């Protein structure tokens, strides 16, 4: 696939680069309010990632890249040694923002390689090179998602009802989306598709974000609570499942939003295809299997209530793992910018990087 950095502007601009700041759709406020939050340095970007202003694996990778670019621009007039130490701090603060989605670390590695490549140049030139690299990561992500969408659309029969979990849409990427990208592409190719969006407890990315994106685009969507997924499958109302991923291990195990694993188990029980759509930057060959993927534990307040309303008693113990791991054996195929990989395993995952 040829990836160009010149991309059509996405319909939903999750991230906007203005030249001296990064504007992010504040996803905490959706769907009630549509507003952007501005970031002017790496620490502000890291906070926005941690606080879920921007979320979704590819989107947080793009945000982190722009965080480094911002810091470099802010330090462009400093002597080289100060520039380097400020940049090293920026890499650290951004790497500490969220642990599971590997795209964050992938994007930071790319920025580090660019920083090393321009180490002999002036700090002003280095800053411009880092801005350029962040813009390339962003532009490439949109193109990659369109390629994923195109490859995945071939798996979607006309008239299909597709279940998805969490939000792997334009809001979770630079644009188009991965799982929702496949759905968008199928629709763009003239297929009639309908979507069942699982609400995705506890942070409600399905109810708030996926439902919002699909309503905006007039793609028919039915919202259900997570506990309704089995019933819908048992009644023959789901033709296939497509989800995104935060990290795919070397053996094809998939970490994605909490609640994905039970959906995959249900899909297997009902012989419904379970597809994972993700860019190669989500595959982490350094992690041998899913059990080694770090799972983020988020705050108890996300489980004890929502939006300022508390429903659980004070004093109750709470667990809040933000992701779970679906074993490769439950994955019908992984869809990447390289095409469709059925029945993923270690050899097939490695081969994706060799072709
Ligand atoms: O906690 P979040 O909202 O960042 O989790 C997002 C997901 O789990 C998505 O499914 C995944 O990042 C893929 S986004 C294309």
Image: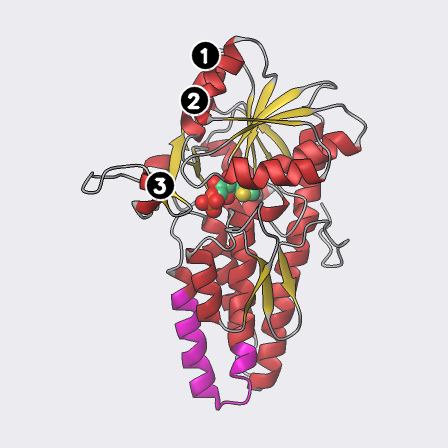
Which numbered mark, 2 or 3, is in the foreground of this view? Answer: 3
Residue displayed at 56% across by 52% down = 59
Nearest the eye: 182 or 309:
309
The C terminus lies in quadrant: top right
In the foreground, 234 or 157: 234
Q: Foreground mark, 1 or 3?
A: 3
Q: Is-magenta flag for residue 83?
A: yes
Q: Is residue 219 above or below residue 330?
A: below
Question: In the image, is residue 320 above or below residue 14?
Answer: above
Q: Earlier in the sequence, mark 2 or mark 3?
A: 2
Q: Position of residue 280 (x, y in %)?
A: 56, 44
Q: Secondary structure at mark 2?
A: helix
Are the residues flagged by discs 1 and 2 in contact, CB closer than 8 Å? Answer: no
Q: CA distance from mark 1 to mark 2?
A: 15 Å
For the residues labelled 2 and 3, the Cα–Cα distance comes to: 18 Å
Compared to residue 327, the image places residue 313 above or below, namely: below
Give neighbour class at mark 1: few <14, some 14-19, many 20+ (Cα, 10 Å): few
87, above or below 136, in the image: below
Name the residue that disc number 1 marks. 269
Please tell me which residue is depicted at 68% across the width and 44% down the height of the picture.
176
Please provide the residue range marked out in magenta.
Answer: 72-93
Front: mark 1 or 2: 2
The residue closer to the viewer here, 85 or 168, is 168
Residue where numbered disc 2 is placed: 227
Most frequent secondary structure within the magenta stretch: helix
Coloured how? secondary structure
Q: Residue 32 at x, y = what percent? A: 57, 47
Report crowding for label 2: few under 14, some 14 to 19, many 20 or more residues within 10 A (C-alpha): some
Lateral position of residue 153 relative to residue 70, left or right:
right
Q: In this figure, which residue is indicated by the disc labeled 3?
A: 305
Tell me, yes or no, if residue 292 can be seen here. no
């Amino acid at each position: 696939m040829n990836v160009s950095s010149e991309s059509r502007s996405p319909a939903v601009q999750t991230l906007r680069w203005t030249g001296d700041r990064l504007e992010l759709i504040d996803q905490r406020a959706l769907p009630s309010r549509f507003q952007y939050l501005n970031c002017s340095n790496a620490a502000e970007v890291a906070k926005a990632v941690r606080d879920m202003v921007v979320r979704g694996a590819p989107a947080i990778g793009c945000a982190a890249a722009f965080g480094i670019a911002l810091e470099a621009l802010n330090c462009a007039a400093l002597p080289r040694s100060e520039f380097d130490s400020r940049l090293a701090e920026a890499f650290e603060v951004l790497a500490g923002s969220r642990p599971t989605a590997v795209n964050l670390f992938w994007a930071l590695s790319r920025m580090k390689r660019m920083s090393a490549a321009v180490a002999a140049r002036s700090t002003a030139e280095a800053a411009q090179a880092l801005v350029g690299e962040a813009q390339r990561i962003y532009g490439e992500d949109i193109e990659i998602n369109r390629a994923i969408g195109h490859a995945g659309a071939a798996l979607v029969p006309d008239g299909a009802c597709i279940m998805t979990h969490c939000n792997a849409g334009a809001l979770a990427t630079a644009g188009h989306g991965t799982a929702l990208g496949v759905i968008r592409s199928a629709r763009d190719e003239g297929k009639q598709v309908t979507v069942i969006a699982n609400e995705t407890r506890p942070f409600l990315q399905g109810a708030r974000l996926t439902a919002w994106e699909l309503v905006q685009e007039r793609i028919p969507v039915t919202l259900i609570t997570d506990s309704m997924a089995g019933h819908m499958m048992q009644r023959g109302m789901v033709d296939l499942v497509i989800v995104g991923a935060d990290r795919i291990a070397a053996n094809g195990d998939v970490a994605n939003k909490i609640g994905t694993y039970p959906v995959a188990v249900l899909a297997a029980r009902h012989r419904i295809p379970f597809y994972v759509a993700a860019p190669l930057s989500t595959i982490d060959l350094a992690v041998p299997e899913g059990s080694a993927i770090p799972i983020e534990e988020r705050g108890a307040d996300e489980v004890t209530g929502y939006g300022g309303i508390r429903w659980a008693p004070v004093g109750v113990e709470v667990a809040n793992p933000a992701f779970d791991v679906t074993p490769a054996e439950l994955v019908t195929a992984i869809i990447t910018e390289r095409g469709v990989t059925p029945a993923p395993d270690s050899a097939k995952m490695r081969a994706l990087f060799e072709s």
